[in-house]
Amino acid sequence: MINIPLIRLLNQQLVSPIFGSPLEVVDWMGAVQAQDPRAARWAIGLRMKLPALSTVEQALDEGLIVRTHVMRPTWHIVAAQDLRWMLMLCRESNERIFRSYFKSMSEELSQEQCGRAFDVLGDALSGGRSLTVAELEPYFAERNLPHAARQLHAYVLMAENSGLVCSGRLRGTQNTYALIDERIAPQPELSREEALARLACKYFRSHAPAMLEDFVWWSGLSVTEARRAVALIADELTVERFKGAVYYLHDACRIRGRMAGTVALLPPFDEYLLGYKDRTAVLPVSFQTHAFTNYGIFFPVIMHRGQLVGNWKRTSVRPASSSFPPPTVSFFRTDLQPSEDALAKAVASHGAYLCR
């Protein structure tokens, strides 16, 4: 019988992490959900040997890792060298979703409009500039292109999906955009089969044990392509059956370790929960409303011995002194509450990350 929570903790780097840099973490994970930028930075830091906010922000600022719309499509942080082939793999399905979304807002874009908008973005961002959406608005106004906020949003989404722009240099809490070709060095092109195999490898080595349905949910691929991806790396996978379901483990997975006393403050939208369609191995259905809503909103949660047992909330965004005040915590499971010492260590780890 496989211990699903333990193996996931090990391979998601939430127990005994083996990587020292944000790039190594993101490269291993394949992609880190980044709907909430602040939460995504903690999700990466939490998986490092020495969690440090400044180190994660430096990697983002230097473009070693980038935040952009990639799979499903939603915000993810990915390793810069992986962005182009991931976009190639997801572009067609993403564009269909984007166009359906824009049409529902009566903002359907023509090919001619997209072409003109891409020209504007190329001119505005050339020379290594990183600009916010608000800073891009005058460039569109000057070219007589519609430039309401929702229209700018549409232009940028399509430009991300087309491989023109990605996240630029950091500007406080604001998202900036830069030209991919100026921010990320050229990489060898992959065939579709090579890209499918690489994506499956990254997912199953970092999220195992996982089912095919989990991979479909995480990647946004069709069931047919997800099956194809799994078949391409079949020699690297071990099949385990548990409660009538088929789980895959990658050869690179760690399967032995200890989680006694393990406590962590997981950010909202964390891969430990969001990376799977079926979350019952770590969160029984009766408690799921404490962790996420039916509308796709995920909350910060406390993990203890592989199970999600409570919620936490940071009480301050920026420190008034050299240390942050401790977060507030509450528990929705009374059968699995951590010791005060274990919880204090988790809180201290988060505080140290913020101040490093």
Image (cartoon, rainbow, N blue to C red):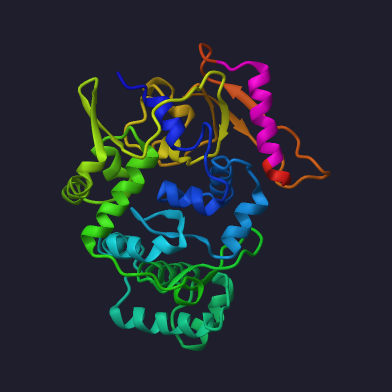
Quarter-of-image position of residue 127: bottom right
Counting from the top left corner in percent of width and height, residue 72 is at 33, 53
Q: Which residues are magenta?
A: 337-352
Examine the structure image and report whether residue 247 is included in the region drawn in magenta: no
Residue at 51 percent across and 34 percent down: it is: 14
Counting from the top left corner in percent of width and height, residue 91 is at 29, 64
The correct choice, above or below, for 253 with respect to 332 in the image is: below
The correct choice, above or below, for 116 with respect to 282 in the image is: below
The correct choice, above or below, for 342 with respect to 15 in the image is: above
Q: Residue furthest bottom?
A: 143
Counting from the top left corner in percent of width and height, residue 221 is at 25, 51
The answer to whether residue 292 is visible is no
Residue at 35 percent across and 71 percent down: it is: 162
Q: In front: 304, or 29?
A: 29
What quarter of the picture does the N terminus occupy? top left
Residue at 52 percent across and 40 percent down: it is: 18
Counting from the top left corner in percent of width and height, residue 337 is at 56, 16
On the picture, is 326 further left or further right than 293?
right
The answer to whether residue 210 is visible is yes
Q: In front: 252, or 301?
A: 252
Quarter-of-image position of residue 296: top left
Q: Residue furthest top?
A: 335
Residue at 29 percent across and 77 percent down: it is: 110
